[in-house]
């Protein structure tokens, strides 16, 4: 984290290689998150690349950034929402996915038992509201703290806690038949499954 802030400071001072490092560190996460907002790969790639071009061109006017990852996630989120209104995707399109719909490919585990768990989890996750799915992804895939979640989602911290609590309660209730009775089990499973995707 300190290195990332160091790269940010160097980039603001005019170091193009430092911006390249930031791009390398965060591109995969930004792309994965972007696809869940707008499932159009080329548009997501273009938005991320253009965002970094704009960062470089406007570096002298950028304020101090404490949390680089959440800053970039907010920027990508805002731009994709803006662009998606210009590049309207019809829900009748066979390739259309509701924002933050999850698929089995989002969890890279091959063992048969784990695959069954993944399939059940995907079904349960997609029963959640779009906002609940987004907070689950930001928390367990992007590993954001509550303050960062509040920044990305434009909510106060307590509202984020409530949103996440309700989402996890829904998951636990939906998965009771396969052993999710404890308060910690579902969080541990989500951290474990999403962490494998990050590797």
Image (spheres, rainbow, N blue to C red):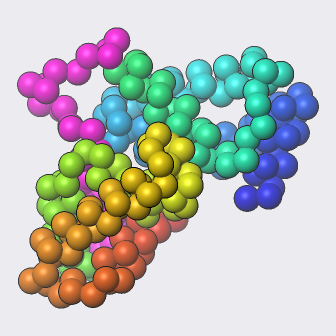
Specify whether residue 92 is painted magenta.
Answer: yes
Q: Which image quarter holds the N terminus?
A: bottom right
Residue 198: image x %, image y %?
49, 61
Residue 27: image x %, image y %?
58, 42
Residue 74: image x %, image y %?
53, 37
Residue nearest the viewer, comparing 111 with 66: 66
The part of the chain drawn in magenta is: 85-110
Instruction: Say left or right for 44 vs 170.
Output: right
Residue in the image at 47% along x and 48% along y:
156
Residue nearest the viewer, comparing 190 with 168: 168
Please say if 169 is above or below 14. below
Residue in the image at 84% along x and 32% along y:
12
Residue in the image at 47% along x and 40% along y:
154
Whether residue 141 is visible:
no
Residue 97: image x %, image y %?
21, 37
Instruction: Name which quarter of the figure residue 65 lies in.
Output: top right
Residue nearest the viewer, comparing 167 with 199: 167
Instruction: Say left or right for 128 vs 198.
Output: left
Instruction: Say left or right for 107 vs 50.
Output: left
Whether residue 143 is visible:
yes
Residue in the image at 67% along x and 49% along y:
67
Per the picture, the main secondary structure of the magenta-coloured stretch is: loop
Instruction: Name which quarter of the figure residue 51 lies in.
Output: top right
């Amino acid at each position: 984290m300190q290195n990332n802030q160091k790269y940010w400071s160097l980039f603001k001072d005019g170091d193009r290689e430092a911006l390249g490092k930031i791009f390398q560190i965060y591109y995969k996460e930004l792309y994965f998150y972007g696809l869940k907002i707008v499932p159009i790969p080329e548009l997501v790639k273009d938005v991320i690349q253009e965002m970094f071009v704009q960062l470089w061109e406007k570096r002298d006017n950028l304020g101090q950034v404490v949390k680089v990852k959440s800053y970039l996630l907010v920027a990508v989120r805002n731009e994709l929402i803006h662009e998606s209104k210009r590049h309207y995707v019809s829900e009748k399109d066979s390739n259309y996915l509701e924002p933050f719909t999850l698929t089995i490919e989002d969890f890279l585990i091959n063992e048969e038992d784990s695959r069954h768990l993944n399939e059940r989890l995907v079904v349960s996750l997609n029963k959640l509201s779009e906002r609940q799915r987004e907070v689950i992804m930001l928390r367990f895939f992007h590993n954001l703290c509550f303050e960062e979640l509040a920044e990305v989602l434009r909510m106060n911290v307590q509202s984020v806690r409530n949103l996440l609590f309700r989402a996890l309660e829904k998951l636990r209730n939906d998965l009771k038949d396969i052993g999710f009775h404890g308060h910690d089990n579902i969080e541990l499973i989500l951290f474990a499954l999403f962490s494998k995707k990050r590797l």
